[in-house]
Amino acid sequence: MKGRGLWQMRRALIVLILLVTWFINPAFAAEPPEKDITLSSLAQSLNAMLEYDPLTRSGTLEKNGKTARFALDTPYVLFDWTALKALPPPYEDQDSIRVKKEFDIALRQFFDTKQALLSKYSVKAIVIDPGHGGKDPGAIGEFENFKIQEKDVNLAIAHRLAELLRIRYPERTIQLTRTDDTYPSLEERVDMANKIKLAETEAIIYISIHANASFNKNTHGFEVWYLNPSYRRTVVDEQTAKEKGEDIAPIINTMLEEEFTTESIILAQKVYQRMGKMIGDQSPARGIRAEEWFVVRNAKMPSILIEVGFVTNKNEATLLSQAGYLRRIADAIYNGVCDFIEHFEY
């Protein structure tokens, strides 16, 4: 019995030594918890395009037409601009942005899901707004042997642009805010666009066409404008706001608002580049600019305003009086719109 008791004590001592070694020896110690993945690493592993704006602290992951919109410290992700999912928010960690495992898994599942062709976003309608009209001539250029009114320039370009788009996209709605020398109010023009019925995966773009004027008769060139990103507007309709609730609707509104601004900038870039190629040798490019024009700040969609030239500059007014030159401007805008649609849909 004495020998058996000694053997049991030795056995217990060996077990104790092994347990102590397990906790002390790093080789046996439990591994530290895995660090949250960086957002850039997640995008790379998904083969998705990552866009992030440090000013708004929000961004988009995009792959094969599918998008996931997120914002730092906001516990929701907006998938394809229709579905909102509660997830641990991305956060800043020194020089990187990191996400939790749950966020990682949710995005992998979303992007790995096969997307039906009909679920892809498409541009259903293009609204073309020839500025001024009727009682409002817009800018006027008066010279010794001719006079030019902005409203006529705008309408001629708009008709040509609408004709080209209807030929290219017979299945889409191409709408003019005026077709003759009439004057719809600014509110009526925007309402025409905002009242177009859309499915969840359909979108509209709004193009307002104008000509410029200046007290300096030497000023000439074209410009493309979009809404100033600092301007806050409501883009979520009342029904959606009711469905999503008071706490969720503002988040969706902010994300959609930023998306409309992003798409407007891309649309402006596409049109601006095409105009530069088409008329840049005769009319200098004056830049892409941000402003809070009524028609672009109240249109709940990607929207731009184009200033095609200065009617107060004699040389440019002469060009803007020529049907062939106006066709070239319309062709440039048309090609820019087509470039944008290709970017947006594919």
Image (cartoon, grey):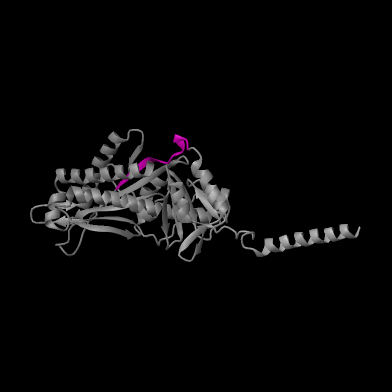
The answer to whether residue 256 is left or right of residue 213 is right
| Closer to us: 110 or 259 | 110
Residue 289 seen in the current view: yes
Please identify the quarter of the rendering in which residue 175 is found: top left
Magenta highlight range: 115-129
Please provide percent x and percent y for residue 85. Answer: 56, 49
Q: Is residue 326 above or below residue 221?
A: above
| Closer to us: 205 or 94 | 94
Residue at image location 42% in from the left, 52% down from the top: 50
Q: Residue furthest left?
A: 145
Is-magenta flag for residue 53?
Answer: no
For the N terminus, the quadrant is: bottom right
Residue at image location 87% in from the left, 59% down from the top: 3
How many labels were placed on the picture?
Answer: 0
Please provide percent x and percent y for residue 198. Answer: 44, 41
Q: Is residue 114 above or below residue 193?
A: above
The answer to whether residue 126 is left or right of residue 137 is right
| Closer to us: 134 or 210 | 210
Q: Is residue 115 above or below residue 319?
A: above
Q: Residue furthest bottom?
A: 94
For the C terminus, the quadrant is: top left
Residue at image location 19% in from the left, 47% down from the top: 278
Residue at image location 14% in from the left, 56% down from the top: 142
Please provide percent x and percent y for residue 335. Answer: 26, 43
